[in-house]
Image (cartoon, rainbow, N blue to C red):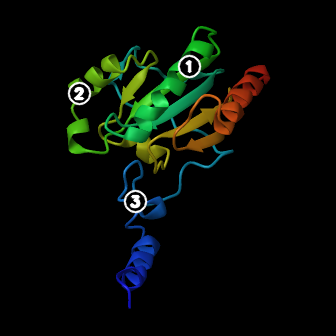
Amino acid sequence: MSRSSALAPTLAALLLAGALGPLGSTGAGVRAAETAPSAAEGGRAPKLTGSDWLNSKPLTRRDLAGKVVLVEFWAFECINCQRTFPAMKRLQALYGDRGDVVIVGVHTPELDREKDPKAVARAVRQNQLPYPVLIDGEWSNWNAFHNQYWPALYLIDRRGVIRKLHIGELHEGTPGWSETVSLVDSLRREHT
């Protein structure tokens, strides 16, 4: 028996048990499912909680009411998140000054070294992230959304309903980008 065929049953068992992320990764960019699936499209978005905000005062439900909201879960050491920064900055440039769209980065640490709020602030500065960032060091927002991925982008309509979940990297010029921008534009035209 070849070495690879000898490992196949073990790999299959690990995948079934959820010990490995997609395609047998060790979890980089993905956290193994612990309780429930990600917040469902069509469901009400949870309230963002926490008092540690960068680039903004704490945003409340009242601040976000009647607006299209893009919530991105990320971690600064996550390479997939880093590759998504240009798209998030472009979305901020497209919609940030219009007043009816709010982009919120929710930094939920994947690694111990990402738990330090000063390190998060340094990463936000170094990467020139212009949108509000909520530091989710206790995982309260991650858990409320039942999120499982870095990065994950939740697109929420003016009524607070999750209309789209984009999992993984987002890049300008891709089908995922076109779908996201098209949906943001469509949601901006919807009445509450």
Q: Nearer the viewer, residue 18 or 69?
A: 18
Residue drawn at x 56%, y 35% as measured from the top left: 170
Asked which quadrant contains residue 175, the reply is top right
Q: Nearer the viewer, residue 157 or 127?
A: 127
Check disc 3 and report its element: helix, strand or loop.
Answer: loop
Is residue 118 shown left or right of residue 59? left
Residue drawn at x 56%, y 13% as measured from the top left: 93
Binning the other alpha carbons within 10 Å of mark 2 as few (below 14), some (14 to 19) or many (20 upward) gives: few
Residue type highlighted by circle 3: Ser
Q: Of all residues shown, which one is farthest toward the front?
A: 2
**Mark 1 → mark 2, Cα distance in angstroms:** 24 Å
* Residue to which mark 2 is pinned: 119
Asked which quadrant contains residue 121, the reply is top left
Q: Earlier in the sequence, mark 3 or mark 1?
A: 3
Residue 71 sits above or below residue 5 on the image: above
Which disc, if any, is residue 111? none
* Residue to which mark 1 is pinned: 90
* Residue to which mark 3 is pinned: 25
Q: Which of 96 and 81 is in front in this view?
A: 81
Q: Of all residues shown, which one is farthest toward the bottom?
A: 1
Q: Which of marks 2 and 3 is nearer the N terminus?
A: 3
Residue type highlighted by circle 2: Ala
Is residue 183 shown left or right of residue 68? right
Tell me, yes or no, if residue 4 can be seen here: yes
Q: Of all residues shown, which one is farthest toward the top?
A: 97
The x and y percentages for residue 138 are: 30, 41
The x and y percentages for residue 15 are: 44, 71
Residue drawn at x 41%, y 33% as measured from the top left: 82
Check disc 1 and report its element: helix, strand or loop.
Answer: helix
Residue type highlighted by circle 1: Arg
Asked which quadrant contains residue 77, the reply is top left
- Which quadrant: the N terminus? bottom left
